[in-house]
Image: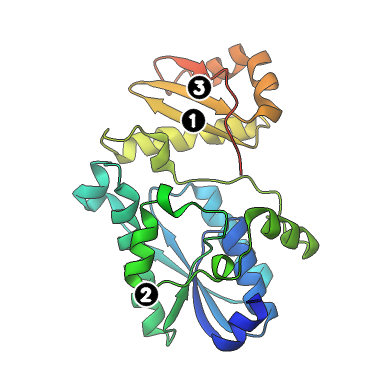
């Protein structure tokens, strides 16, 4: 099935919108196909401020309705405890809130940006999507991450080469309690690295210490600026280490 066919059959949809590569292309494609579409963005402590601002600007640029839903994800002890299936519980809250708002606005079909490259076996959140009946047009139409980046570039979307950005909770070791303080430290650390010119990285928390991970294209630069990075992050962590192995980007 082509995306146009999907929107011909489902021409009134709500999109769970993050401002990332996938959900941005999905939103763009829906508008281009002539569908009645509205973007719903959940704002929580798991999302860095710049991502939220990006989402607002992108929705305006694409030209569709946009609604912000504020959610206290840490109020659920199952999420805060950070078990292996934390994403499942978190996704339950997010999709429940989006579906409630969407239904109130007259949208019965809710879609997300899951694509054909996403591994269902490696993502507990997939279970929640299935339980809520969330549609994933990009996945249903067989579009991979590579396909979406290419199509986004052709459409001149600014997200075509945007690095993948998992939520801040992924920076904390599974089984270690998630707190707003830890998330704030992580967001600040990544903001500092971004201001230093880095694009694709992770600031992992390891107790009171920080482990900085960079993709292969920027690892050499990060290692050459190791002292500068450690100094810049010294107020946030007891010790800062740069991982000598490159992280994989998508």
- Discs 2, 1 touching: Cβ within 8 Å: no
- The alpha-carbon separation of the residues under discs 1 and 3 comes to 10 Å
Q: Which residue is mark 3?
A: 233
The residue positioned 55% from the left and 71% from the top of the image is 137
Q: Position of residue 126 (x, y in %)?
A: 39, 59
Tell me the crowding category of disc 2: few under 14, some 14 to 19, or many 20 or more residues within 10 angstroms, Cα based: many
Marks 3/2: CA–CA distance: 40 Å
- 10 Å neighbourhood of mark 3: few (<14), some, or many (≥20)? some
* Residue with the mark numbered 2: 99
Secondary element at image label 1? strand
Residue 242 rendering spot, x and y as whole percentages: 54, 18
Label 1 crowding class (10 Å Cα cut-off): few <14, some 14-19, many 20+?
many
Residue 172 location, quadrant:
top left
Name the residue at the top extreme: 227
Which comes sooner in the sequence, label 2 or label 1? 2
Image quarter (top left, top right, bottom left or bottom right) of the C terminus: top right
Question: Is the Cβ of the residue at disc 1 closer than 8 Å to that at disc 3?
Answer: yes
Instruction: Report how far apart the C-alphas of labels 2 and 1 lie in the structure.
Output: 32 Å
Mark closer to the chain start, 3 or 2? 2
User: Residue 34, position in %: x, y?
Assistant: 66, 85
The label on residue 4 is: none
Q: Which residue is mark 1?
A: 203
Location of residue 231 (image quadrant): top right
Above-or-below relation of 29 to 176: below
Residue 56 rendering spot, x and y as whole percentages:
57, 63
How is the protein colored in the picture? rainbow
Q: Residue at x 67, y 71 (%)?
A: 62
């Amino acid at each position: 099935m082509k995306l146009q066919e999907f929107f011909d059959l489902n021409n009134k949809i709500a999109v769970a919108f993050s401002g990332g590569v996938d959900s941005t292309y999905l939103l763009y494609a829906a508008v281009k196909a002539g569908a009645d579409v509205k973007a719903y963005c959940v704002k929580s402590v798991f999302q860095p401020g710049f991502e939220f601002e990006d989402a607002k600007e992108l929705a305006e640029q694409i030209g569709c309705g946009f609604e912000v839903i504020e959610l206290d994800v840490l109020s659920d002890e199952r999420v805060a405890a950070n078990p292996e299936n934390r994403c499942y519980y978190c996704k339950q809250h997010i999709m429940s809130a989006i579906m409630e708002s969407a239904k109130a606005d007259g949208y019965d079909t809710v879609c997300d940006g899951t694509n054909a490259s996403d591994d269902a076996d490696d993502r507990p959140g997939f279970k929640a999507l299935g339980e809520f009946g969330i549609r994933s047009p990009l996945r249903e139409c067989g579009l991979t991450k590579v396909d979406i980046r290419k199509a986004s570039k052709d459409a001149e979307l600014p997200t075509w080469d945007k690095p993948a950005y998992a939520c801040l909770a992924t920076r904390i070791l599974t089984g270690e309690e998630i707190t707003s303080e830890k998330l704030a430290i992580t967001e600040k650390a990544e903001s500092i690295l971004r201001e230093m010119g880095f694009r694709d990285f992770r600031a992992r928390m390891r107790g009171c210490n920080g482990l900085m991970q960079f993709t292969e294209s920027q690892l050499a630069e990060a290692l050459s600026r190791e002292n500068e990075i450690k100094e810049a992050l010294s107020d946030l962590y007891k010790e800062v280490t740069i991982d000598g192995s490159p992280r994989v980007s998508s």
